[in-house]
Each structure stands twice: as C-alpha cells, then as structure tokens.
Amino acid sequence: MSGYDYKSEALTQMTSKLRKSAQNLAKSASSAPPAPDAGDSSAILAEVISDLLKSGAAIAAKQESIAGKIHASNGTYDDVENTNTDALKQAHREEGGRKWG
C-alpha cells in the first residue's frame, strides 16, 4: 500500500485516553497530601512532593494539548483526502475522461 492510511476510530480512542489520563493526573496533582513528618528531612521531602505535583500538572496540560491536536488532525485527514480526490476527479474530467463515481 502506498500513501497514508489512518483509522478515525483509533484517533478518537487515542484522544479520549489522553484526555482521561490528563484529567486523572490533574486531579491527583491538585490534591496535595498533608505535609510529611520526616524529621530533619521534612522540608526537603515537602519540596520533592511539590515538584512532583507541579510536574504532574505540566504533564496533564501537555497531554490535553496533544489530545486536542490529535482531535483536530482527525478531521484534517478527511478534508485532505476529500480535497485530493476531488482534484483528481476534476483533472480526469478536464482531460476528457469519463466521470468518476
């Protein structure tokens, strides 16, 4: 097979899974656990937890961004395919060929 191929359902599933994962991660990142009591290491541990929560929120935002791009590209594939098909049909007619489809 030449060219490209895609399954709209697969892109829709990928978008859905990324968005669900992003929502779950954002929810987890927004609910900080209570401050740990680790003696002298408490401040360091609290900073590590804070950094993890910030990273989780950043990952969730990136997942949502990627999901949005996949969702947008799903329609773009159809548009490109339809546009190219129409252009080929028009070129074929202009050369005196019989009408397609």
Image: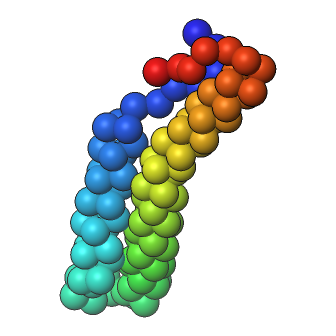
Name the residue located 73 percent from the left edge and 18 percent from the top edge.
Answer: 96
Q: Is residue 69 above or below residue 48?
A: above
**Image color mode:** rainbow
Classify 97 as above or below 9: above
Q: Is residue 90 above or below residue 101?
A: below
Q: Residue 88, relative to residue 16: is it above or below?
A: above
Quarter of the rendering containing residue 33: bottom left
Of 84 and 5, which appears nearest the observer? Answer: 84
Identify the residue shown where x is 58% and y is 10%. 1
- The x and y percentages for residue 19 are 32, 61
| Residue 100: image location, x then y, percent | 53, 20
Q: Is residue 80 visible?
A: yes
Residue 99 placement (x, y as % from top left):
57, 20
Q: Is residue 96 left or right of residue 77?
A: right
83 or 26, nearer to the observer: 83
Residue 88 horizontal side relative to residue 23, left or right? right
